[in-house]
Image: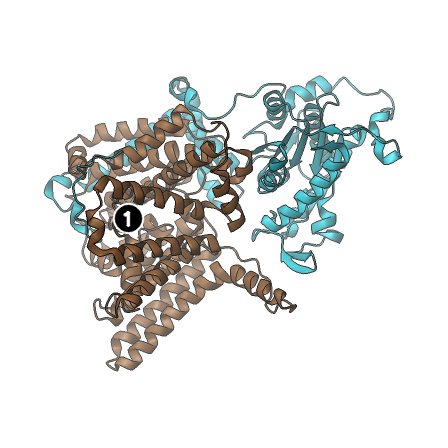
Amino acid sequence: MLFPTVQFAIFFPIVLTLSWLLMPKQRFWKPYILFASYVFYAAADIRFCLLLGGITVANQLAAKAIHASEDERRRRWITAAAVTFDLGVLGVFKYYGFFTQNVGDLLDSFGLGMPLPLLSIALPVGVSFFTFQAISYVVDVKRREFEPASLIDVGIYLSFFPHLVAGPIVRAREFIPQLASVRDPQHVAVGAGLGLIGLGLVKKVMIADYLGREIVDPAFGVPQAFGGPDLIFAAYAYAAQIYCDFSGYTDIAIGLALLMGFIFPQNFRSPYRALGFRDFWRRWHMTLSRFLRDFLYIPLGGNRKGKVRTYVNLFLTMLLGGLWHGASWTFVLWGGFHGAGLSAEHALGRRVERVPRWLRWLITFNLVVFAWILFRSPDLDLFWTYVTGMFSGGGLELVTIPAVLALLAVIGLQLVPESDTHGFEARLERINPIVLAVALAALILVVGATVPSQGVPPFIYFAF
Amino acid sequence: MPDPQLPPSHHTDDSLMERFDEEKLRRFSARDAVICTVLIAFLLLIFSGGSVRQAGEEMDPGTYRDIVMAVGEPAGWVADQLPLSDIGHTLTGWLSPDTELVGATFEEGAVAGAGGGAVGGPSPVTPEWFEAGALGEPQPKKPLETLLVTGDSLSTPLDVELGQSLAPDGVDVVRDPHLATGISRDDLVDWAQLSATQVADDEPDAVVIFIGANEGLPMPGPGGEDVSCCGPEWAAVWANRARQLIVNYAQKGAAKVYWLTVPTARDPDRAPITDAVNAAVYAAAAPMRSDVRVLDMGAIFTPEDRFRNAIDVDGRETIVREPDGIHLNDAGSALAAEEVEAALARDFDW
């Protein structure tokens, strides 16, 4: 079920109303919200609910077993088994085809046949997100940073519909404590919630989908049909599209959760104003960045084992972070590109700070946009065609005034000093909520008018 | 260019969970949240209730559709009684990205065609029923300048494959897939009008159409009553509609049409629909073989009408279908594109 759809517009008011009615009685509210979240997920495919349920039960059993044991070795083994199980699920559903294809290619080059059965496996929506959340839960229990919660709390944590399919990747210690007590019905961030939902809809439907439909999809579909200026423009357009698509989803998710009385972690902070790769990853998909840092980079040794190991760890972390996005070499290389950028930045150390800020911004932004070409390309052949095409001549078929304005708005607004945008939610919170509701209804009608007859395309991160 | 005096970044990658903790950010109550949400839903229903009904009609049968229709039908009725929907449309209609369609609808085309045809016997066979080249009468090849690739979701990524293959040779490949649409599903888009609009906009030399993933819906028969899938009556209505498309696309012989049949799906329940659609394609094309090439995808992907996930491609088993068991994946679309290109090469130079 997509957020900007009629189905969700029916689902949410009912769920929200019943949620607040049942909230005082937690023994009713918890099963109810768990059921509602599974209904939400079943709209994609009811079979996926079994997978989500299985992951929940398996990780809860592991967390309980870890907590019950004082033997560090045993705790480590159980954690390893749970993480292996989670990654195994992810591997089968997400990477099996990629793995068999590449093994087959390799063996073919030696004249050997395909040793593995070819299976066409449907990717369960959100599997990358809820498996990572399950891993974070078990590992936090193992690290004694969090005590195991009840099965129903873990079930709600993993399935809570606002974050279920595309994050943010919420840590158990951030969410489960919010389930411990009744959410305060007298203090709800209604203004901020409605404002974020409206902002997210505009970003997704009016900007991201428009840029995708008019600029990005044609250019990346058949780059041979366009000249260099168009392809360069489309690369920047994709940077704006993916930001608006993903941060739009996150805004809506955070807004919905706020209306239900819950707070999610921040996931974006003007990523295109970053002054370096490290800064970029503190602003882009922040909940994935910290997951990779806490559960991959630091366990690998982080920066504690010398310079070379630090670079290797950074590179490896980002390589796997790239692969997390999808089973394709382009994602791996995208991760590798960012890993190399982070390593280079680390190697340069404070010398980077001698470079003027505007130049650091310019270099970072353009390198990030270049890396997005890898991310968007379905394969390396098309990436190469696209990049070489950028240096060819040609007209400006794709460059239109609305597209340029959309691009300038998305990137330009991120360069506004953050102190000026801080307090936006507080200002919304001062407005009468009825006025806000009418304004959001009007906005939805306007946004809805821009939806083509074929409907709203899925969020890009639904595919991950 | 950003301000060179950009303030330094002091972010840490913490979760900022406390950002809504301030009292001024939580001034309202749960009651306000519910009132606002219900008010928004109410306003949307009275302004746009018809779109709820339409969304329900476009959904696949099942519980979720029943729920949407349970809301959509009364909401649509209320919206129909009020002028607000028209006002909303007047104010926001200009924002729609959809192309304004031209030409006759299926319904208008059916009425116009009702009086045609021979009376008292089968229609006479004319030379247009035959592909001259197949009868040993070589036809001069024409230059291929513009190729339109269209259809429902089956037509993509076939469109991308053809574009990537032909664009470097200077062919303008117009990709125009219309997802979730169907020839028997004219609530979303009327393909008779759409095809007329595509031809008016692009004037293609050749049209590749691959459609059939969303078929099987009842259509009005010759007497106006709905005909259910998938008997001869339904196939006849579908074939007449398909013929209307072929007439539009062929532009009185100025363009060639390449119609791909639908390979068997994994779900056996879809087999009657696929069989009826494919039979109707052949029937529709029969009197216009001089303009239409029917490309048999079943022979490539599902010989003997048996679903296969993977087939032998260049001596190696390769998955050619998407996990849904309906669509072709990239590898399958590349194979289909090869078949299309081979057919194009018999009629065109590029």
Give A147 or B152, whichever is nearer the viewer: B152
- Relative to residue B90, is residue A31 depicted above or below? below
Chain letter, cyan in picture:
B
Residue A39 in the image: state x and y as whole percent. Answer: 40, 50
- Relative to residue A186, is residue A109 depicted above or below? below
Residue at x 58%, y 43% (from the top left corner): B157
Q: Amino acid at mark 1?
A: Phe
Give A338 or A324, whichever is nearer the viewer: A338
Q: Is residue B133 left or right of residue B228?
A: right
Q: Which of the 4 image quarters holds residue B275?
A: top right
Q: Which of the 4 image quarters holds residue A421?
A: top left
Q: Is residue A1 left or right of residue B327?
A: left
Residue B149 in the image: state x and y as whole percent. Answer: 62, 34
Q: Is residue A288 left or right of residue B334?
A: left
Residue at x 37%, y 61% (from the top left corner): A131
Residue B235 visible in the shown view:
yes
Q: Which of the 4 image quarters holds residue A159?
A: bottom left
**Disc 1 sits on a residue from what chain?**
A
Q: For the N terminus of chain B, give its image quadrant.
A: top left
Give B220 or A330, whichever is nearer the viewer: A330
Q: How many marks?
A: 1
Q: Which residue is mark 1?
A: A280
Q: For the C terminus of chain B, give its image quadrant.
A: top right
Could you say whether the residue bearing mark 1 is in a helix, strand or loop? helix
Mark 1: few, some, or many residues within 10 Å (few <14, many ≥20)? many
Chain letter, brown in picture:
A
Residue at x 26%, y 72% (from the top left corner): A142
Residue A432 in the image: state x and y as whole percent. Answer: 17, 30
